[in-house]
Image (cartoon, rainbow, N blue to C red):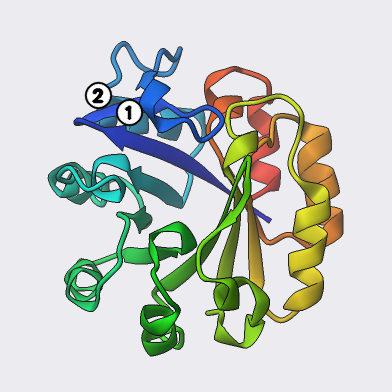
Amino acid sequence: MQIIPVLDLKMGQVVRAEGGKRDSYRPIVTPLSDTSEPLGVAKGLLRLHRFRTFYVADLDAIEGRGDNLDVISQLRGLVGRVWVDAGVEDEATLVKLLAEDHVRVVIGSESQADAALLLRFRDDPRIVLSLDFFADGYRGPREMLEKPDLWPGEVIVMTLAKIGGSSGPDFEKLEEIIRLAPDRKIYAAGGVRSEDHLNRLEEMGVDGVLMSSALHGNSLKSEIFSQYD
């Protein structure tokens, strides 16, 4: 199982995500960096462990107020691969992102009006699907959730209501998705805070974990990271 650090970008800064309430996100305060500047935070994460992949949520792009693509381009120089959720909702934007080296593009269900874009690109190995769950439930076209034959090889179960909290991952939802598509790689996002959480997720067959708060909050011993690489 792989640990993938998350960088949430807003107005050129890394912000602390909590509960999916994006209006309240503020620049992150972390022992890993003196500032919330993205490269500084990323380098701090890499001092913690030589992670192979970063997940970047471009919140400005997701909410339709510009983007942080220049910052993302700089981050690509630090790690082998960057997963990018930039609120992609059309083919032109998706193709533009796919042209970048070492990038995998996340198609977030919350950004889709229908399943057409996913259907066109699901066989591209550089595509990752994010099934987005907020406090009020799933957001996105129902067929993207209910028809696993539409899914690409890698799927994120993004439980935004759990992000930044201490209640743990949505194990029940993860088990449901794994049952629907046992041949896909499933990644957990939201609420992962402890070694016990990691152990349980691995036992369930989860292939990777997207993580932020636990990395900045010193709730995990550094030697744990080499076990999940």
Q: Position of residue 59 (x, y in %)?
A: 31, 41
Q: Depth check: give the residue in front, 23 or 136.
A: 136
* Amino acid type assigned to the residue bearing label 1 in the image: Val
Question: Which numbered disc, 2 or 1, marks the residue that appears first in the sequence?
Answer: 1
- Residue at 75%, 30% in the rendered image: 194
Residue wearing tag 2: 37
Residue depicted at 48% across the width and 45% down the height: 51
Image location of residue 99, percent across then percent down: 18, 73
Residue 221 coordinates in the image, percent (x, y) = 69, 24
Mark 2, other Cα within 10 Å: few <14 / some 14–19 / many ≥20? some
Residue found 30% across the figure and 20% down from its top:
36
Q: Looking at the image, how many numbered discs can be counted on the residues?
A: 2
Disc 2 element: loop
Secondary element at tag 1: strand
Label drawn at residue 14: 1
Front in this rendered view, residue 199 or 179: 179
Q: Position of residue 129 (x, y in %)?
A: 50, 68
Is residue 25 at least partly visible in the picture?
no
Q: Position of 78 compared to 175: left or right?
A: left
Q: Nearer the viewer, residue 60 or 100?
A: 60
Q: Are marks 2 and 1 in contact (CB under 8 Å)?
A: yes
Vertical order, 45 against 56 (above or below): above
Name the mark on residue 89: none
What residue is drawn where x is 78% and y is 33%? 195
Q: CA distance from mark 2 to mark 1?
A: 6 Å
**Is residue 10 positioned above or below 174 on the image?**
above
